[in-house]
C-alpha cells in the first residue's frame, strides 16, 4: 500500500496557494495564532483522539473583510479515501459521543477540520461562523507524475455547533481568493439557511424577469426594433460588457462603460464604439474564435450597429443603444455575475428566442430543449473527457453546453494543474461542433457558448445536409463519437434524416459510439419507416424513453421520446431494447403556453433528481438506487423488428396486467364509502386505515358464484356513452346554493366540488360512472349532477337490471386498472378513444359477465369497511374518554 503524501506533497501544495492569497494565518505546531478566540477554543477542547493534548489544525486562516472576520480551519490528508467517509459530515455517533480517533475525526480530513470549526464556534463569546477546509491528495496509479487533489469546504454556525453543512467541492484553493470571497460567503449563508437562499433566488428571479420585460418593452414597444435586430442589440451589448483580462488582474479589453457612449458621430458613434469593443473581444479572448467565425458574428451585428439609426440621439439626450445598455447594466448584468443562484442564461435565451422570426412553417420546429433534458441525454450517451460531440441542428447550443460541462467535470477527476488546463482548452477548441442554419439562432448559439464558458470555436453557420464532416477552419475530419439532437420535426422522417446523415459520417469514420435524439413519437411508430430501417442497418437501438407530454414550452400536445443508439453494429433481431415510461419525471408543470421561461412553474414534487438518475442507471446498465420505474410496470425489455421500422415506442411494448386486484376493489369501495359517511357527518374527517386481507374469502366467493376466469371485453359492449355533456361555467355558479352535486374532474371528495342550484335542464342523470376527460378521474355518481367540462363523459351499463351502486363500484376499480396505463393526467381520454378500449371482468362458464359475483364482492368489501369504521369509532371514543378522565358509565 502506498504511503501518505500529506507532508511531502499535499501540505506544500495547499500552503503555497494559501500564502499567495495574503490572508492572516497561523500554521501548525505552535505557528502564530492571530486570533485569541480561535486559540482559546482549540486549547480548551479535547484533541481529535479525545485526549488532553494541544489541538493543532494543519492551517488556520483568518479571513477579515471589513466587518466580516471568519476563521478557516484546515486539515490535510495524503491517501486515497481520506477526504471523507461520506459527503454529509457527522461528528457524533448514534449515542451522542464524538467520533474521536480512527472512528472518524482523526481519520478523515473533513471530520478533523469540521471538529476544529465546531469547537471554535461553540467557545463562549466566540465566532458565530467558521469554515472547515479538507484537502486530500493521492496518486491513482504509481506511474502518475502529479497527484490527484480534492478539496471540500464545510461551514459550522454557533446556532448549532454540531451541525456541519457542506458548501462545495473544489480542485484547488482559488475559491479563497479575495475576489471570490463575497460569492463564497454567500454560498456559505445559502447552505446554512436554505429557506433564505430560496427567497433570495425567487427575488433575483423576479428581478431578472422585470429586467427582461423592461428591455423588451424598450426595444419593441418604444422603438419598434425588429426581432432580429433586438437579438443583435442584446448580443452585442452583452459581449461588449464582458471584457478580457490577462489572468493577472489587468484588462486587455475593458468592459464597455456607459461613459463611452456619448452620441458621437462617424467612428465615435455609439454603434461604432460597441461594434469595435465586440470585435476586440472576439480577437483577444481565449480560446480565440477562428477568423471566419469572428467575421460571421460581426457581419450579423454590422447592420444593426452601423447601418441603423440606433446611434442617433433622441429626446432623452442619449441614443437607443445607450439607453438599452443602461437598462441591461442595471437589470441584467448583476444577475449574470450571480449565475450560481439563478439560471441567467436560461431565462435570457428563452426571452430572446421568442423574438426570433422563423420563416415558413418552421415555427413549430424551433423549440428550446430544456436543460434538464440535454443533461439527461449527455449522461445517456456516456459523454466523458475523451468524447467528441456534435449537434447537427444546434439551436442555441444547449446540448453542447451540457456536453462541455460534463466533459470538463470528468477531466477534473483525471487531470491536474497544467494538464487539466490543457485538456479543458482542448475540449472547448477541438471536441465540440454544432451546425445551425438560421442566422439569428446561430448568433444566439455563439453568445450562449461564450456566456457559459465558451466552446464556440466550432459553431458553424450552414446547412447540415451539405456538411462534409470537417472542422470549418482546417481540412481535418471531426472524429465524432457522440451525436445529440433535437431535430426540426417538419424535416424528412420527422427529423430522422439528420440522425441518418450524421450516423453515416460517424460509421464511415468508425469513430461513433453513441447517439441520442429527442423526437416526436410518430417518427418511431410508422411515419418514418424507411429512415428507421436505414438507421438500424449500422446502429443498435438501446433504449426508448417516453417523455412528459408538457416538456416543451407552448407544445403541450407534442408527444416525444428519446431514442438512444449504440453505433457501429446493425441492430440484431434478438436485441432487447429498454422501454421506459418517463412521463412522470418528478416535476409538476403548469400551463406552459403562458410562460416563456421553463423554470417558471416547474416545481419538483417527487424526487426528480432520483428519477433522472434511475433512468440513466437503467439505460447504462448500472445499479439503481431507487425503484420509481419498476420492471414490468413502467420499464420493459422487449425486442423490435429491425426490418419493420415502426415499433420503437414504449406504448407498443407495454405488457400490463389489467385484471384488477383485490386492493383495487378495496380502495374503490373504501373511498366511496368514506365519502358517503363524510357527507352524513357534515364533512367531519374519518381516518382511513388499510383493512385486513380478505383475498381467501374473495376467492371462495368466486367459486360460490361460478366465476371461471377473467377476460378482456370491449368497454362499449357493457356500457353506452352519454351524448356530449350539458355543461355550465364555473363563473355562473354560486357555491352552496343548492343540493345538486357539482361534479368536476378532481381527485378528492368523489369529484364533488360543491352543491348548487342551477337550471335543471343542464343536469346529468345519476347512477353512472363519471370520467374526467382531462384527468382520468373515474368515480361513481349516484345522484343527478351538474358538470363543467365538455371533455368529461359518463358511462351507463346497458343491462339496467345490473346497474346497482355496488356493481358499478366494482367496475370503477376495473376501469381504473385497465385505463391507467393507457392515459395519464393531461393525456386526454375521450368518448372516441374509449370506444376502442377494453377492460377485464369476471365471467361465468357461458362467457357472460359474473354480475352476482361483482355485487357480492363489493358488498363484502363494504361490510369490511363498515367494521373498520366501527372499530375506529370505538377506539376514538375510548381515547377521548381517557383524555377527559372519564369512563363509559360516566356518559351513560
Image: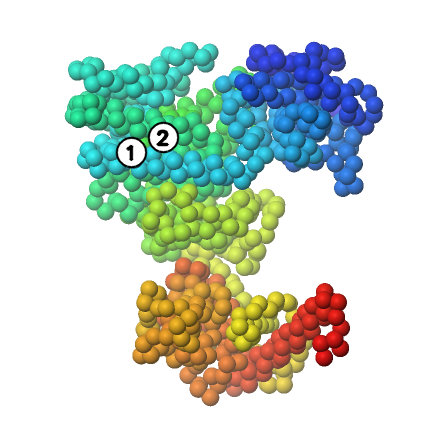
User: Going 79% across and 19% down the picture, which residue do you hit?
Assistant: 54
Q: Residue 892 placed where, x, y %?
A: 72, 79
Outermost bottom residue: 801
Tell me the tag on residue 215.
1
Which residue has dot 2 on it?
332
Mark 1 is surrounded, within 10 Å at the Cα level, by few (under 14), some (14 to 19) or many (20 or more) other residues, namely: many
Occupied quadrant, residue 355: top left
User: Going 66% across and 22% down the picture, which residue do you hit?
Assistant: 73
Above or below, 180 against 403 in this view is above
- Mark 2 and mark 1: Cα distance apart in space: 9 Å
The colouring scheme, among rainbow, by chain, secondary structure or one colour, is rainbow
Q: Secondary structure at mark 1?
A: helix
Q: Residue 325 placed where, x, y %?
A: 29, 25
Q: Secondary structure at mark 2?
A: loop
Task: Name the residue nearer the viewer: 700 or 780.
Answer: 780
Residue 386 visible within the image: no
Q: Are marks 2 and 1 in contact (CB under 8 Å)?
A: yes
Occupied quadrant, residue 763: bottom left
Task: Name the residue nearer the viewer: 303 or 98.
Answer: 98
Tag count: 2
Q: Residue 845 placed where, x, y %?
A: 55, 85
Amino acid at each position: 500500500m502506498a504511503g501518505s503524501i500529506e507532508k511531502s506533497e499535499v501540505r506544500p501544495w495547499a500552503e503555497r496557494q494559501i500564502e499567495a492569497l495574503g490572508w492572516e494565518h497561523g500554521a501548525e505546531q505552535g505557528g502564530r495564532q492571530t486570533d485569541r478566540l480561535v486559540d482559546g477554543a482549540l486549547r480548551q477542547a479535547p484533541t481529535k483522539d479525545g485526549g488532553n493534548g494541544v489541538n493543532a489544525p494543519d492551517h488556520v486562516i483568518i479571513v477579515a473583510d471589513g466587518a466580516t472576520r471568519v476563521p478557516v480551519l484546515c486539515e490535510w490528508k495524503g491517501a486515497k479515501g481520506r477526504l471523507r467517509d461520506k459527503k454529509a459530515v457527522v461528528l457524533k455517533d448514534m449515542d451522542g459521543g464524538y467520533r474521536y480517533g480512527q472512528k472518524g475525526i482523526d481519520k478523515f480530513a473533513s471530520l478533523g477540520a469540521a471538529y476544529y470549526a465546531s469547537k471554535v464556534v461553540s467557545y463562549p463569546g466566540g465566532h458565530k461562523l467558521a469554515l472547515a477546509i479538507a484537502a486530500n491528495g493521492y496518486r491513482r496509479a504509481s506511474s502518475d507524475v502529479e497527484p490527484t487533489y480534492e478539496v471540500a469546504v464545510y461551514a459550522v454556525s454557533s446556532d448549532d455547533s454540531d451541525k456541519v453543512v457542506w458548501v462545495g467541492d473544489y480542485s484547488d484553493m482559488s475559491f479563497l481568493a479575495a475576489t471570490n470571497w463575497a460569492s463564497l460567503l454567500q454560498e456559505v449563508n445559502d447552505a446554512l439557511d436554505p429557506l433564505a437562499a430560496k427567497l433570495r433566488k425567487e427575488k433575483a428571479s423576479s428581478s431578472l424577469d422585470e429586467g427582461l420585460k423592461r428591455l423588451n418593452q424598450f426595444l419593441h414597444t418604444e422603438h419598434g426594433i425588429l426581432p432580429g435586430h433586438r437579438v443583435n442589440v442584446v448580443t452585442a451589448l452583452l459581449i461588449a460588457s464582458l471584457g478580457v483580462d490577462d489572468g493577472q488582474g489587468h484588462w486587455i479589453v475593458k468592459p464597455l462603460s456607459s461613459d463611452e457612449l456619448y452620441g458621437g458621430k462617424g467612428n465615435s458613434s455609439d454603434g461604432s464604439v460597441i461594434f469595435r469593443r465586440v470585435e476586440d473581444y472576439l480577437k483577444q479572448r481565449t480560446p480565440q474564435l477562428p477568423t471566419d467565425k469572428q467575421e460571421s458574428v460581426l457581419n450579423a451585428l454590422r447592420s444593426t450597429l452601423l447601418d441603423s439609426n440606433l446611434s442617433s440621439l433622441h429626446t432623452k439626450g442619449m441614443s437607443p443603444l445607450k439607453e438599452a445598455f443602461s437598462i441591461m447594466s442595471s437589470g441584467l448584468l448583476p444577475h449574470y455575475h450571480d449565475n450560481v443562484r439563478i439560471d441567467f442564461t436560461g431565462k435570457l435565451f428563452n426571452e430572446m428566442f421568442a423574438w426570433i422570426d422563423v420563416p415558413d412553417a418552421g415555427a413549430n420546429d424551433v423549440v428550446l430543449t430544456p436543460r434538464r433534458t440535454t443533461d439527461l441525454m449527455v449522461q445517456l450517451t456516456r459523454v466523458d473527457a475523451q468524447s467528441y460531440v456534435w449537434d447537427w441542428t444546434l439551436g442555441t447550443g444547449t446540448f453542447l453546453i451540457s456536453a462541455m460541462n460534463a466533459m470538463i467535470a470528468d477531466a477534473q477527476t483525471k487531470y491536474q494543474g497544467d494538464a487539466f488546463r490543457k485538456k479543458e482548452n482542448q475540449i472547448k477548441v477541438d471536441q465540440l461542433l454544432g451546425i445551425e442554419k438560421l442566422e439569428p439562432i446561430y448568433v444566439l448559439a455563439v453568445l450562449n457558448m461564450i456566456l457559459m464558458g465558451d466552446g464556440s470555436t466550432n459553431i458553424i453557420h450552414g446547412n447540415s445536409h451539405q456538411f462534409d464532416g470537417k472542422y470549418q477552419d482546417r481540412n481535418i475530419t471531426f472524429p465524432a463519437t457522440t451525436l445529440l439532437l433535437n431535430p426540426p420535426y417538419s424535416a424528412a422522417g420527422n427529423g430522422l434524416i439528420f440522425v441518418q446523415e450524421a450516423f453515416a459520417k460517424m460509421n464511415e469514420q468508425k469513430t461513433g459510439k453513441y447517439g441520442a435524439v429527442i423526437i416526436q413519437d410518430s417518427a418511431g411508430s410508422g411515419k418514418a419507416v424507411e429512415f428507421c430501417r436505414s438507421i438500424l442497418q449500422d446502429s443498435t437501438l438501446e433504449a426508448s424513453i417516453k417523455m412528459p407530454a408538457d416538456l416543451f414550452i407552448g407544445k403541450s400536445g407534442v408527444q416525444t421520446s428519446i431514442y438512444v443508439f449504440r453505433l457501429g453494429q446493425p441492430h440484431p433481431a434478438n436485441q432487447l431494447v429498454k422501454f421506459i415510461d418517463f412521463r412522470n419525471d418528478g416535476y409538476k408543470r403548469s400551463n406552459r403556453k403562458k410562460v416563456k421561461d421553463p423554470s417558471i412553474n416547474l416545481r419538483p414534487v417527487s424526487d426528480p433528481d432520483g428519477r433522472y438518475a434511475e433512468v440513466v442507471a437503467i439505460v447504462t446498465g448500472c445499479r439503481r438506487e431507487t425503484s420509481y420505474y419498476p420492471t414490468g410496470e413502467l420499464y420493459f425489455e422487449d425486442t423490435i423488428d429491425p426490418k419493420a421500422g415502426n415499433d420503437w415506442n414504449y406504448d407498443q411494448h407495454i405488457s400490463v396486467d389489467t385484471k384488477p386486484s383485490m386492493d383495487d376493489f378495496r380502495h374503490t369501495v373504501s373511498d366511496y364509502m368514506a365519502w358517503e359517511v363524510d357527507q352524513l357527518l357534515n364533512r367531519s374527517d374519518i381516518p382511513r386505515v388499510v383493512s385486513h386481507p380478505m383475498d381467501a374469502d374473495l376467492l371462495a366467493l368466486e367459486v360460490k358464484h361460478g366465476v371461471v376466469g377473467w377476460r378482456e371485453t370491449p368497454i362499449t359492449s357493457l356500457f353506452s356513452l352519454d351524448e356530449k355533456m350539458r355543461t355550465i361555467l364555473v363563473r355562473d355558479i354560486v357555491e352552496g346554493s343548492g343540493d345538486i352535486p357539482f361534479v368536476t374532474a378532481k381527485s378528492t371528495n368523489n369529484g364533488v366540488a360543491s352543491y348548487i342550484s342551477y337550471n335543471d335542464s343542464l343536469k346529468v342523470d345519476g347512477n353512472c360512472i363519471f370520467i374526467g376527460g382531462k384527468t382520468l378521474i373515474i368515480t361513481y355518481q349516484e345522484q343527478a349532477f351538474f358538470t363543467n367540462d365538455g371533455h368529461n363523459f359518463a358511462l351507463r351499463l346497458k343491462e339496467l337490471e345490473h346497474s346497482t351502486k355496488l356493481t358499478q363500484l366494482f367496475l370503477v376499480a376495473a376501469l381504473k386498472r385497465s385505463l391507467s396505463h393507457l392515459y395519464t393526467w393531461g393525456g386526454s381520454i375521450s368518448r372516441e378513444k374509449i370506444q376502442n378500449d377494453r377492460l377485464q371482468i369476471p365471467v361465468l362458464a357461458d362467457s357472460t359477465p359474473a354480475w352476482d359475483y361483482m355485487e357480492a364482492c363489493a358488498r363484502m368489501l363494504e361490510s369490511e369497511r363498515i367494521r373498520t369504521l366501527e372499530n375506529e369509532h370505538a377506539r376514538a371514543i375510548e381515547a377521548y374518554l381517557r383524555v377527559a378522565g372519564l369512563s363509559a358509565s360516566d356518559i351513560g
